[in-house]
Amino acid sequence: MSGKRAVLLDRDGTILDQDGYLGDPAGVRLLPGAAAALKALAAAGWERIVVSNQSGVARGLFTVEQYARVEEAVRAALRGEGADLEAVYVCHHLPGAPDLRWSVACDCRKPRPGLLLRAAAERGIDLARSVLVGDAARDIEAGRAAGAAASVLVRTGKGRATERLLAGDAAPDAVLDSLADLPAWLAVRFRPATG
Ligand SMILES: [Mg+2]
């Protein structure tokens, strides 16, 4: 028996037009086509799970409570466009951070695979049938480390710069202009076997 298939999504630069440390819900801006893409993924039977480094907490830039308000604003913005997420997994740690409560050499900060592994264990996800999508090298690396079927880079956020950096074994399995292109790519790459 196999688990569910999921798209594991980075947040900043992948779903949100955001590349800094967002501690203010008023700063939430969805990238064009992101909500529609999440809707299409849901319709195609993909669970949608965010896996996000949010070390702004460890850096003292915002609190866990402020982070939670931003997360709720993201979910509200998506709901406003008829889309949703099944779950959000977040890492607030940063080794060497000024706030010693969060200065932890954790297993969850991407490029480590802990967020993905926890999502899989808690939600019955089969990572070997699942896909990671993100705009940074650490996203691609985390997808690989977790054993995802594919790790996809988007050219939003820092994606264009990342694309130039990643070559050879580190190269993503695909590079798409944005999350908006993912449903169509998945439909071809993961077409169900016919028989
Ligand atoms: Mg990102």
Image: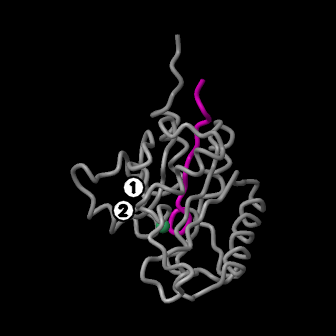
Question: Which residue type does callout 1 highlight?
Answer: Ile
Q: Do callouts 1 and 2 mark residues in contact (Cβ within 8 Å)?
A: yes
The location of residue 81, given as percent across then percent down, is 74, 59
Q: Which residue is located at x 43 percent, y 50 percent?
A: 143
Q: Which residue is mark 2?
A: 137
149 over 117 or under it: above or below:
above
90 over 153 or under it: above or below:
below
Q: Is residue 143 left or right of residue 22?
A: left
Q: Which residue is located at x 51 percent, y 40 percent?
A: 127
Q: Viewer-proximal residue, 52 or 178?
A: 52
Quadrant location of the N terminus in the rendered image: top right
SS assignment for the magenta stretch, majority: loop
Determine the image quadrant of residue 99: bottom right
Residue 4 among magenta residues: yes
Q: Which residue is located at x 63 percent, y 73 percent?
A: 29
Residue 179 among magenta residues: no
Q: Is residue 169 left or right of residue 19?
A: left
Q: Viewer-proximal residue, 64 or 180?
A: 64
25 over 170 or under it: above or below:
below
Mark 1 surroundings: few (<14), some (14-19) or many (≥20) residues within 10 A: many
Q: How is the protein colored in the picture?
A: one colour
Gap in angstroms between the C-alphas marked 1 and 2 = 5 Å
Q: Which residues are magenta?
A: 1-14
Q: Is label 1 in a helix, a strand or a loop?
A: helix
The location of residue 114, given as percent across then percent down, is 50, 56
The location of residue 151, given as percent across then percent down, is 42, 48
Which numbered disc covers residue 140?
Answer: 1
Question: Which residue type does callout 2 highlight?
Answer: Ala
